[in-house]
Structure formats: C-alpha cells, structure tokens
Amino acid sequence: MKPMLERFEQNRIECEELLADLLSQSVFRFDASLASALPKVQGLYIITTKDETNYVHVGVTKENQKRKNGLYGRIWEDHFTWGNSSGDLLYQVQKILKIDKHDAQRWIAEQCRVQWLVQADQNLRYWAENYAESLLRPSWSFLGSDKGLISTGTAFGKERGLN
C-alpha cells in the first residue's frame, strides 16, 4: 500500500473509533443532572433530538483564554444558559421558533439530548468533529421543519400552534 493511502487509512480508523466511542457515551437531558455531570475539560459532543434520530449539532471545545470550562462551558453555559452566538443551540431555538430565552431553555430540556467524549488532543478533536459532521450531517433545520421536533405532538408545540 502506498504511504499516503496508509496514512489515510490510519486517520480514518482513528476518527471512526472516536466517533463510535462518542456515540456509545451516556445520553443526557438538558437539566440539573447534566450540569453536575459535565467535566470542565476539553472534548467533543453531539446534540440530538430526544429520540436520537436527528443530529442537531456536532461540536468541540476550544482552548483559549475566554473559554476555560471545557465541555461544561461549551454545552451548559453556551448552548443552554447564555446562547449569545449563532453557533449556540439556545440562540438557534430562539431564532427559529421565535420564542424567548426561558421558553427556549424549556424547549431544549424537553426536546434535545447531548453526549460527549473527553479528548485532550485539540487537533484530533477538530478532525473528529469534521469526520462526524460529514457522516452525521447535523442541521439546525430539524428545529423548525415540518419533519422536525416541533411536529412531534409536544405540549410545547401545541401551546404555540406549531403542530
């Protein structure tokens, strides 16, 4: 086998194993048990619909001065508590469903789940994130499409005439 093909195969296997490991991790709701379970170390994560049939987001933590709380900071603080940027679940739910922050948090708690994997190697996290995105094809569109979460018959959707 040519050296480049060997390298390709090694990289593919490494990312495939990381993705399999990530998908085999415990699944958590967005609630108090999640906040206490999340580690403040670096890693990668996936956010799914509650039935785990749609991938909403694949992400990694980044090492910088601003972000020191690892997975806890990225998942709990950014995606669920603050939601200040377009890459955050809370922001997207507010925007797509046209609801306020409190209702968006409640909706996320009812409709979404998260899994994570601790991974210290920053480069490997980024490669695994790209690999996972290419296979799982996550999309915010599940939040507001006719086939998405709001059409599952939840009380939340019915309250707002979304079903």
Image: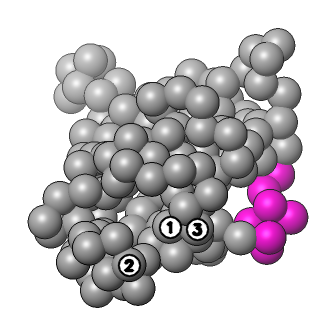
> Amino acid type of disc 1?
Trp
2 or 1: tag closer to the N-terminus: 1
The residue positioned 21% from the left and 20% from the top of the image is 2
Q: Nearer the viewer, residue 79 or 126?
A: 79
What is the spatial separation of the Cα atoms under label 2 and label 1, in whole angstroms? 12 Å
30 or 41, which is in the foreground? 30
Q: On the image, numbered disc 2 is attached to which residue?
A: 159
What's drawn in magenta, residue-wise? 32-39
Q: Quadrant of residue 58?
A: top left
Seen from this angle, which residue lies furthest top? 65
| Tag 1 near tag 3, CB within 8 Å | yes
Quadrant of the image for the N terminus?
top left
Is 163 situated left or right of 71 in this image? left
- Residue 129 location (% of width, % of height): 44, 37
Q: CA gap, disc 2 to disc 3?
A: 13 Å
Q: Residue at x 73, y 43 (%)?
A: 77
How far from the left and from the top, in percent, is residue 28? 63, 72
Label 3: few (<14), some (14–19) or many (≥20) C-alpha neighbours in 10 Å: some
Looking at the rendered structure, the kind of residue marked 3 is Arg
Q: What residue appears at the point 66 percent right and 24 percent down from the top-left corner?
A: 62
